[in-house]
């Protein structure tokens, strides 16, 4: 069986119930020279246009500054990465768009401007538009001639987007829909030429989407929102007052808006996962450089164990996040290519490919945004008092990071969505989860069998740890599904516990597989820091899985059943003690010698 055939067989969520060979996963070190050149062009753009103007951008005192920078991004092709060449874009792959989102993550508030346009602003038309709509709008969006925004959220419709009150009423002559309603937290609204607007027609259960041009009329806005962070991105409330939209500007079919919103948000989630990475690396490099320069007690603070621990932990979490983000991105791309090879239309294949990996998209969004928060928090701490100063780079990074856990669906909503989706797929037979769960249940009441693991082979012991962590999820998730049945979605705390376990499994396995593949390509000595980061994260992940599982077990079991599950948990989270202090010092020493985050792949 060829490797391509193996890749094509993967389903979303299947990582939980199958062993994944290292050669099967994509690692970011495998990006082509062409992809790396695109990443470098994007990095050069940030250095030229964003970094020197960061304060001016955030001040919002020059209304034309961000729109002009935005147009320059369009001239470089950065706004049309995934738009097909026939519509004025570059027609590059899904994982290439992940890479560009990654690099743009270092652009502060401009990364929100960029993501809102290239993602939720452009993709609805690319994936759901008619040929006439694509020909009319995509060339303008791909080149930056027009800016786009996405109008879904309302004052009383955030996480529950389908409860929106905005109405679309067909005109008497049947030529227009008149849209009336209020939208809020709309990124790019202040300079957008095109609005993707969601509204309900009559008493429809689901939303309908429309392409609305600013010149249609009936559109007013509040002033720019005063925000905690991403201050340089335009965010406004938008009011539609009998805004006349031609019937041919309905996007897809009547009542299909909610499906569009869900699928586009899936893409937004995995792109946001990649979109924090540039910011993480920049903060880590600043912190490392500052730690080298800052002297206390006659020496650089980078020589202190407490600082080394922070630097190494920041790098470790970022490395793990890279691993899972690009693994998920390539899985999506492989599925898209497989569906196209099977005769599916390109656009439909892209939607189905992302939808198949919606669980991994949610994991990427959650893990990445929480790692970014950790990195900026520790960055401030490394700077100490100076970190609290607006003159140092940490203050802006700290404020800008906080939004990532909220937009594209809050992390809490995403946690519950991913577990609900996993259980539904299992119930439908799309994912064989209950059979392995039953096997784990039998293992709990059987005499433990002890197999000797050859620990001289790299990652043999770690693979056994990952296998056992999967058993933890199957044990706790299977028992929760049986005990709580259709009430499980009301037990949000349990759902979040299960999500935390699932996230850690995907994260730790992704980093291990990436490192194993790197070792096969470069040798063990050249990869000693990658091995160290993998082992550091695994030791921590086991403890986090144990804590989440214990909390869940305590909430829906008691008596002998609880004792059996706790014994199983102890067995499945058993791991040899790791000297994480020495491993962190090893990683930190490399960082300190280089004076930056030294593990960048592009």
Image (cartoon, helix red, strand yellow):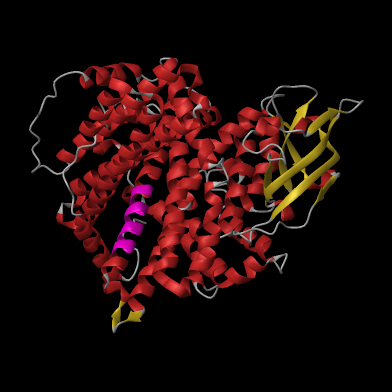
> Looking at the picture, how far across and down is residue 109, in whole percent?
58, 59
Q: Is residue 342 visible?
A: no
Let me know if residue 245 is in the magenta part: no
Q: How many marks?
A: 0
> Looking at the picture, how far across and down is residue 22, in whole percent?
25, 38
Question: Which residue is depicted at the point 34% across and 81% down?
Answer: 295
**The C terminus: image quadrant:** bottom left
Let me know if residue 316 is in the magenta part: yes
Nearer-the-camera pick, 122 or 553: 553
Of all residues shown, which one is farthest toward the front? 559
Nearer-the-camera pick, 104 or 546: 546
| Left or right, residue 22 beside residue 166 | left
Question: Which residue is depicted at the point 10% across and 35% down?
Answer: 453
Nearer-the-camera pick, 74 or 252: 252
Nearer-the-camera pick, 214 or 467: 467
Of all residues shown, which one is farthest toward the bottom? 298
Question: Which residue is depicted at the point 28% across and 41% down?
Answer: 542
> Looking at the picture, how far across and down is residue 30, in whole percent?
32, 48
Q: Is residue 522 visible?
A: yes
Q: Is residue 563 above or below residue 33?
A: above
The boundaries of the magenta stretch are 309-321
In which quadrant of the rendered view does residue 567 lie?
top left
**The N terminus: image quadrant:** top left
Magenta highlight: main SS: helix
């Amino acid at each position: 069986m060829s490797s391509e055939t193996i890749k094509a067989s993967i389903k979303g969520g299947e990582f939980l119930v199958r062993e994944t060979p290292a050669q099967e996963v994509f690692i970011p070190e495998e990006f082509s020279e062409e992809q790396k050149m695109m990443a470098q062009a994007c990095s050069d753009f940030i250095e030229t246009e964003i970094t020197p103007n960061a304060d001016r951008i955030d001040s919002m005192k020059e209304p034309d500054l961000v729109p002009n920078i935005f147009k320059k991004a369009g001239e470089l092709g950065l706004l049309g990465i995934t738009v097909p060449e026939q519509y004025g874009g570059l027609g590059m792959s899904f994982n290439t768009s992940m890479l560009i989102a990654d690099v743009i993550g270092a652009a502060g508030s401009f990364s929100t401007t960029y993501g809102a346009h290239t993602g939720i602003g452009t993709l609805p038309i690319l994936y759901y538009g008619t040929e006439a709509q694509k020909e009319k709008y995509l060339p303008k969006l791909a080149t930056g001639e027009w800016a786009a925004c996405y109008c879904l959220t309302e004052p009383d419709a955030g996480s529950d987007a389908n409860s929106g009150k905005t109405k679309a009423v067909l005109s008497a002559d049947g030529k227009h829909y008149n849209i009336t309603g209020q939208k809020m937290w709309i990124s790019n609204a202040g300079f957008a030429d095109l609005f993707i607007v969601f509204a309900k027609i009559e008493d429809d259960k689901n939303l309908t989407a429309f392409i609305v041009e600013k010149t249609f009329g009936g559109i007013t806005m509040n002033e720019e929102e005063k925000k905690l962070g991403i201050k340089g991105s335009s965010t406004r409330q938008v009011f539609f007052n009998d805004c006349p939209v031609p019937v041919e500007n309905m996007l897809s079919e009547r009542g299909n808006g909610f499906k569009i919103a869900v699928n586009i948000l899936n893409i937004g989630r995995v792109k946001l996962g990649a979109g924090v990475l540039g910011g993480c690396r920049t903060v880590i490099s600043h912190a490392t450089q500052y730690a080298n320069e800052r002297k206390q007690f006659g020496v650089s603070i980078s020589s202190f164990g407490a600082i080394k621990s922070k630097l190494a932990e920041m790098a470790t979490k970022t490395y793990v996040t890279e691993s899972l983000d690009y693994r998920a991105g390539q899985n999506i791309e492989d599925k898209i290519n497989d569906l196209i090879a099977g005769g599916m239309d390109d656009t439909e294949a892209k939607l189905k490919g992302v939808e198949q990996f919606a669980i991994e998209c949610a994991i990427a969004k959650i893990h990445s945004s929480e790692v970014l928060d950790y990195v900026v928090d520790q960055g401030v701490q490394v700077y100490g008092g100076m970190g609290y100063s607006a003159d140092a780079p940490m203050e802006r990074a700290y404020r800008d990071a906080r939004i990532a856990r909220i937009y594209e669906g809050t992390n809490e909503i995403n946690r519950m969505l991913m577990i609900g989706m996993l259980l539904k797929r299992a119930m439908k037979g799309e994912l064989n989860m209950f059979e392995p769960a039953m096997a784990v249940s039998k293992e709990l009441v059987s005499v433990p069998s002890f197999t000797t693991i050859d620990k001289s082979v790299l990652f043999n012991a770690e693979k056994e740890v990952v296998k056992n962590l999967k058993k933890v999820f199957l044990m706790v998730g299977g028992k929760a599904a049986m005990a709580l049945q259709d009430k499980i979605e009301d037990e949000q705390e349990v759902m979040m516990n299960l999500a935390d376990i699932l996230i850690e499994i995907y994260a730790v396995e992704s980093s291990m597989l990436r490192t194993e593949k790197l070792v096969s390509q470069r040798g063990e000595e050249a990869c000693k820091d990658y091995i160290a980061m993998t082992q550091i994260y695994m030791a921590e992940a086991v403890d986090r899985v144990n804590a989440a599982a214990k909390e869940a077990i305590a909430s829906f079991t008691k008596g002998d059943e609880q004792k059996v599950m706790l014994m199983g948990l102890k067995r499945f989270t058993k791991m040899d003690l790791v000297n994480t202090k020495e491993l962190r010092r090893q990683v930190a020493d490399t960082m300190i010698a280089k004076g930056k985050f030294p593990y960048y792949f592009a």
